[in-house]
Amino acid sequence: MSWKWQKRGSLTYLTIPKWQDKGIDLGFSTRVGGASRVPYGTLNLGLHVGDDPTSVLDNRKQWLDQWGAVWSEVAVGEQVHGTNVIWIKEEDGGRGIRELETAIPAVDGLLTQSNVGLMAFYADCVPLFFYFPDLGAIGIAHAGWKGTVDKIGQKVLECFEEAGGHIENAWVAIGPSIGPCCYAVNESVAVQFRANYRETPFLHAQEGGHYHLDLWEANKSVLLEKGVRSENIDVASICTADNPEWFFSHRRDGALTGRMAGWIRQKDNERRV
């Protein structure tokens, strides 16, 4: 598996060494090593879930410290389970990282050619990370079932392509999320996937009119269809719902639970947009 577990200080997280070797900081946090109390114990990084904001900011600072980043070098989007994707600039650094009100509104995908780090938050939804070497650009997206059915991965790739990038050179990583083992959906969800996808091998019929949905394969199929090379797609294949010691899960725990973070940043990139 290209994804590897790392421990730094009190924090345990996942990363991809070959991305690090290219000068791309990439990480997906676990729930371990923070200041939050039950039911958000302990490294909750979401400000919007009812946790004590002081604890969340302590956790976020601890997370950023391990990457050598500061508040003003990070941008966060609102995340509304949509497919809006935007480019951000260096002056967007600091938005959304310390308060919800300053987050970039109504977006689920962020792209940049700057050195601003991009963060997004998850508790079963799929984290998508992007690197375009020929553009000197990175991206992050939040793909729940709604973002997946509407192909947010495709929207990100189209934004890169419009900026002059070549999709066949793209690197994409699919991080931990709820897996097909734990994600049952009903017929109304299945109908929407059938309407938007030519084939749906990622829908596995079960008794009682339900399906097990493989969000990893659904998102990967979108990437392949747009021209990303299979060897450039790194899938973690780690289920958040099935690993309570490591991850928060909305499906498993309900609304009162924390959030993990996805993080991506270019180190010392001279290009700017």
Image: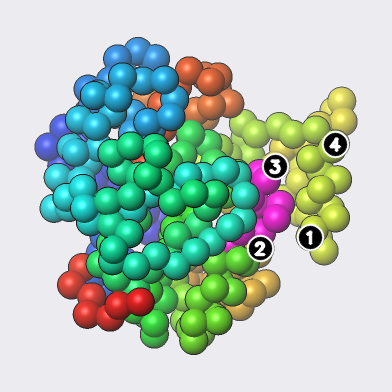
* Scheme of image coloration: rainbow
User: Which of labels 1 and 2 is toward the front?
Assistant: 1
Q: Residue at x 76, y 54 (%)?
A: 201
Q: Which comes sooner in the sequence, label 3 or label 2? A: 3
Counting residues from the start of the chain, the first of labels 2 and 4 encountered is: 4
Range covered by the magenta-colored residues: 145-153
Q: How far apart in space, not on screen, are marks 1 and 4 (Cα)? A: 15 Å
Answer above or below: position of 30 versus 78: above
Alpha-carbon neighbours of circle 2 within 10 Å: few (<14), some, or many (≥20)?
many
Mark 3 secondary-structure assignment: strand
Residue with the mark numbered 2: 221
Residue at image x 67%, y 46%?
Answer: 146
Which residue position is annotated with label 1? 197
Amino acid type of disc 4?
A: Glu
Instruction: Point out which mark residue 213 bears.
Output: 3
As displayed, is residue 155 above or below residue 262? below
Looking at the image, which is closer to me, 115 or 32? 115
Q: Is residue 254 magenta?
A: no
Amino acid of disc 3: Leu
User: How many angstroms separate mark 1 from mark 2 (CA)?
Assistant: 9 Å
Q: Who comes first in sequence, dot 1 or dot 4?
A: 4
